[in-house]
Image (tube, grey):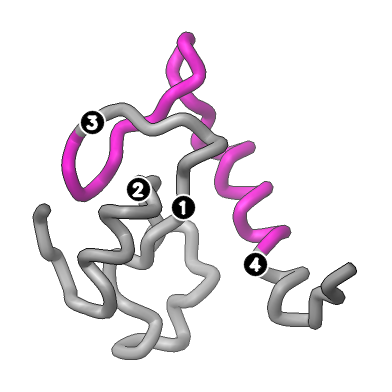
Amino acid sequence: MKQIGKKGLLRQKTRRDWIKNNPPNHQGYWTCGICGRWVHESAMELDHIIPSSHAPQLIDDHSNLRPTHSKCNRIKGSKHGVQV
């Protein structure tokens, strides 16, 4: 079993807190912040609007996070404000 370090635990807590403060719609979906389509929690990643490589102080700031599809987030990479 893979062990999770301190950073991994912090990311998990950030995700749980973000979901608690930003619940999905009544059907269990959020809107992807990149493509605009619905994304379910099982396929959702939290994207840093301002990439953490550009603003590491915002890495766990909820106002800098948005729900995205894994694929959309991978395509965006560390670019700022990219639409797919």
Q: Residues within 10 Å of mark 1 (few under 14, many from 20)?
A: many
| Mark toward the start of the polypeptide (3 vs 4) | 4
What's the residue type where badge 3 is placed? Arg
The location of residue 11, given as percent across then percent down, is 64, 67
The answer for how far apart the CA atoms under marks 2 and 1 are is 5 Å
Closer to the camera: disc 4 or disc 1? 1
The residue identified by callout 2 is 68
Residue that carries the numbered disc 4 in the rendered image: 11
Query: Between tags 2 and 4, which lies in front?
Result: 2
- What residue do we see at 32% from left, 54% from top? 71
Q: CA distance from mark 2 to mark 3?
A: 9 Å
What is the residue that sits farthest to the right in this orientation?
1
Q: Nearer the viewer, residue 5 or 15?
A: 5
Q: Residues at badges 2 and 1 in contact (C-beta under 8 Å)?
A: yes
Image height of 54 relative to 63, above or below: below
Specify the amino acid type for callout 2: Thr
Residue 57 in picture, x, y percent from top left: 46, 85
Q: Are marks 4 and 1 in contact (CB under 8 Å)?
A: no
Kindly identify which residue carries mark 3. Answer: 37
Comes first in the chain, label 2 or label 4: 4
User: Which residue bears the numbered disc 1?
Assistant: 45
Return the residue nearer the eye: 13 or 82.
82
Residue type at mark 4 is: Arg
